[in-house]
Amino acid sequence: MPFAPLQNDSFLRACRRQATDHTPVWLMRQAGRYLPEYLATRARAGSFMGLATNVDLATEVTLQPLERFPLDAAILFSDILTVPDAMGLGLSFEAGEGPRFAHPVQDEAAVAALRVPDLDRLRYVFDAVASIRRALNGRVPLIGFSGSPWTLACYMVEGAGSRDYQLIKSMLYGRPELMHRVLAVNADAVAAYLNAQIDAGAQAVMIFDSWGGVLADGAFQAFSLAYTARVLAQLKRTGADGQDVPRIVFTKGGGLWLSEMGALDCEVLGLDWTVNLGAARALVGEGPQGKALQGNIDPNVLFAPPAAIEAEVARVLDSFGAPHQERASTGPTHIFNLGHGISQHTPPEHVAALVAAVHAHSRRLRS
Ligand SMILES: Cc1c2[nH]c(c1CCC(=O)O)Cc1[nH]c(c(CCC(=O)O)c1C)Cc1[nH]c(c(CCC(=O)O)c1C)Cc1[nH]c(c(C)c1CCC(=O)O)C2
């Protein structure tokens, strides 16, 4: 079924390093607990996974932030841990404790048993993508996403979030062949998962390497970057409506490896707040093979009053410098975002101030 034509293509244009009238903005975790309407819908669903697996409710919460703020992109409402759940690891979210797996991958037998899941078990995600595309009706593009092979492995081996990554690093250093097998299965699963989202209507895809930055130099390249590259090599280049599908890679804490990430076969690199956007642009943003850059304001800025938020937004936009403005060619572009996910304690009015400031100041930068 054909989808409605896109009314606001600023996000996709910036991904393709094409000029836009303003710097497009969206926020990691823009649908979530800081919005009272999200909490109300989650209460109706009963639980987070109840919400994520209900196509109508997942569609509803994806659109909630767009009803409040003039964001330039939507992101599928789901979670990165749906993939290991479909592998049979038994995902649950304990109230106030974060995710937990009933069957973590902690020995040789569990590693040997690991398989790319039957995509039918993730059908609810692809149905949500198609449903959200229909509900958006061309307002803004829809981003699909997955965790990186490494970040998924962190949860699969630790069995939950971790502070020191002791279990997975023990496997990495002590039984590297087991670690490589987990990452290879994850990479092929992530590629199949993202390709199915693209087929269902995702217009861009993002790989969240949230824990790449906990790795040592050398280990990052071998155990995170190499498997992100293995995913990228398998991704479809064309979406359900015949358009190219930009690929975004975000490594939290990856700033020191930026030039190596510049060699990835993707269009956009996401950056956390430790990176200077102008320096990143000089390193990986210029030239015909340059990447578009996405980021990178500290999410905690949103706890300051609106005047301070506006000043920090201007500082981040100015640090990137004047974006490419020639309609006929490509060049350095910036997509505004947070440097990591939004906090559940964020006042929604402060998000409104941030989005308005990005649009206003980025228009001034172009005049
Ligand atoms: C590491 C990671 C996870 N999930 C995700 C990542 C990568 C991004 C990042 O680094 O933040 C990705 C994610 N999770 C969620 C989205 C939805 C789309 C969006 O609006 O951005 C996305 C893109 C919903 C969610 N995923 C989760 C919630 C909160 C659950 C609830 O409603 O109680 C939401 C809205 C649960 C979740 N899911 C995860 C954790 C650690 C938790 C619990 C802790 C927390 O809430 O921050 C794993």
Image (cartoon, rainbow, N blue to C red):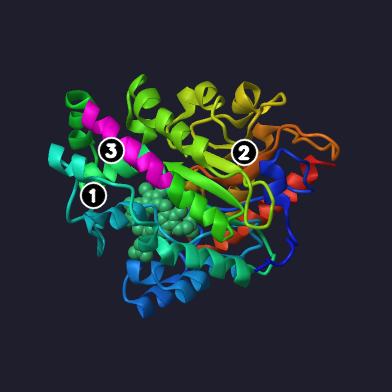
Identified by mark 2, the residue type is: Val
Marks 3/2: CA distance? 38 Å
User: Does the segment drawn in magenta span residue 181?
Assistant: yes
Residue visible at 47% across and 32% down in the picture: 229
User: Disc 1 residue type?
Assistant: Ala
Query: How many residues crowd around disc 2 within 10 Å: few (fewer than 14), some, or many (20 or more)?
Result: many
| Residue named by callout 1 | 160
Nearer to us of marks 2 and 1 is 1
Whether the residue carrying mark 2 lies under 8 Å from ligand 1 is answered with no
Disc number lying in front (1 or 3): 3
Total tally of numbered discs in the picture: 3
In what quadrant of the picture does the C terminus appear?
top right
The residue indicated by pointer 3 is 182
Mark 1 surroundings: few (<14), some (14-19) or many (≥20) residues within 10 A: some
Dot 3 crowding, Cα within 10 Å, few <14, some 14–19, many 20+ = many
Callout 1: CB less than 8 Å from ligand 1: no
For the residues bearing labels 1 and 3, Cβ distance under 8 angstroms: no
Q: Please report the residue visible at 42 percent of the width from the left and 67 percent of the height from the top.
A: 124
Q: Is residue 107 visible?
A: no
Q: Which residues make up the magenta segment?
A: 177-190
Q: Which residue is tagged 2?
A: 316
Q: Quadrant of ligand 1?
A: bottom left
